[in-house]
Amino acid sequence: MSIQTTNPATNKVLKSFDEMTDEQVDTAVTKSNSTFKEWKQTSYKERATLIHKVAKLMREQKTKLAELITLEMGKIISQSESEIDLSANILEYYADNAETFLADKKLNPDSGEAFVRSSPIGVLFGVMPWNFPFYQVVRFAAPNIMVGNTILLKHASIVPQCAIAIEKLFQEAGAPDGLYTNLMISGKRSTALVDDVRIKGVSLTGSEGAGASMAAAAGKNLKRSVLELGGSDSFIVLEDADIDKAVEMAIIGRMNNNGQSCVASKRFIAVEATADEFLEKFTAAISSLKVGDPMDTKTQVGPLSSEQALKDLLDQVTRFEKAGAKVATGGKRALEQGAYMQPTLLTNLKRGEPTFYEELFGPVASFYKVKDEQEAIDLANDSPFGLGGSIYTKDIERAIKIADQIDSGMVFINQPTASQPDLPFGGTKRSGYGRELAEQGIHEFVNKKLIRVS
């Protein structure tokens, strides 16, 4: 069986790769397990030296790696370059801070002495998505390699060249064989791999269905897991917001990565005092976006990741319309060739309709007018997801009080949900559990060992 990579800008197959056999996968797990026994004995300095080398190589090869992202999944080239920069930043962040984050924690028992020591747990299995082919991998791999764990990585099947490139970066940096291993296998084989007793923890970023399957497998085997799943982030505009700035942030929040982000702003909620002005300006801004070749620096919205993703999104919009939604702008395929969707805005969506609770994964926004702040909060929380969200107002204290009432893992004020190395990332409800990035992200797959001196 082969794994294909297709350019979504042209829908032409670029390359095919053979899937690994069961024997090859077993050999990889065996090697990763044996390497762990050696890697866990290395110092933080040795680990940091390697991770810094990977970051350096990534920066040196930024142009080539960014083009690979754009070629395989359609991200516009400037954003692909930014993803490589962010990935290198994450590598350097953990190389520089892991030792401090994992330092012994002294306790104060009634008598004697005690402390908690952080220890690696073994081979970790990561299942990562296509929408951020380098960033998603690095935020899982970097902290855990610094802990002393080893990594087996099954990447999304539509970005096999990105997957191979990441493994090569580790090899070029001088990583021991088995420290970071790319598994060229289908998604169907991932869950079964969790049964392997040599694998001690699992991290998945992807769909609800994939997350539920992986969590069930991890639970059955009593293994730790971290899940980062879907999102339907709210974008709340209050009456005192700077509307022009809010519209600017709305375009960034919704259209980044061609709208294919779990933390994209997806549900735009404006109180009635400012709703009409925001809607008029937001509609005009969406309508003016330039759709085209993602390699062209003038392009603002590129293709979806695949022709199937486009078909699924078009079908979703049709179902939303049948449920009463209105298309304010867009709503159709864009361009004759490639998986392009017109930037789209939906209005008149009805709470209670099954479509209301779906995640729209692409350049499609939904708009809601509400009476007041409390109705905005209620609407924001009326979702099975709880990943991120944002609030727009000049009154920061008010925004913080509202943020306290939003059921999500992250709330940003006056900017869309974003990611950086030193901020924890993760959600609640059906958006998953656990945290990545920042200090919190390094403690998910660590044995907190108590050492007591009587």
Image (cartoon, helix red, strand yellow):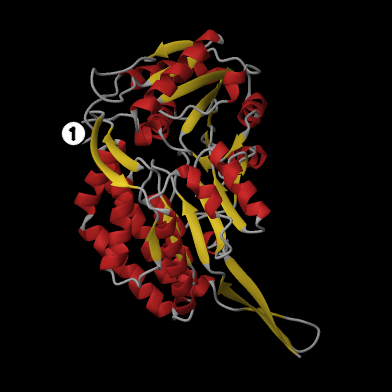
Location of the C terminus (image quadrant): bottom right
Q: Residue 246 at x, y = what percent?
A: 43, 30
Instruction: Name the residue that disc number 1 marks.
Output: 296
Residue nearer the viewer, 157 or 450? 157
Left or right, 307 with reference to 404: left
Quarter location, residue 2? top left
Residue 421 is at least partly visible in this image: no
Residue at screen point 64% across, 47% down: 216
Within 10 Å of disc 1 (Cα), the crowding (few <14, some 14-19, many 20+) is few
Q: Is residue 394 above or below residue 55?
A: above
Q: Residue 74 at x, y = what percent?
A: 29, 35
Furthest-right residue in view? 110
Quarter location, residue 294? top left
Residue 223 is at least partly visible in this image: yes
| Amino acid found under the numbered disc labelled 1 | Asp
Q: Is residue 14 above or below residue 362?
A: below
Q: Is residue 160 above or below residue 384?
A: below
Q: Residue 230 at x, y = what percent?
A: 53, 37
Label 1: element kind: loop
Left or right, 209 with reference to 259: right
Residue at screen point 39% across, 68% down: 178
Q: Residue 229 at x, y = what percent?
A: 54, 41
Location of the N terminus (image quadrant): top left
Residue nearer the viewer, 449 or 11? 11
Q: Is residue 165 above or below residue 104?
A: above
Left or right, 340 with reference to 216: left
Query: Could you tell me how many numbered marks the image carries?
Result: 1
Quarter location, residue 243? top left
Residue nearer the viewer, 105 or 241? 105
Residue nearer the viewer, 311 or 400? 311
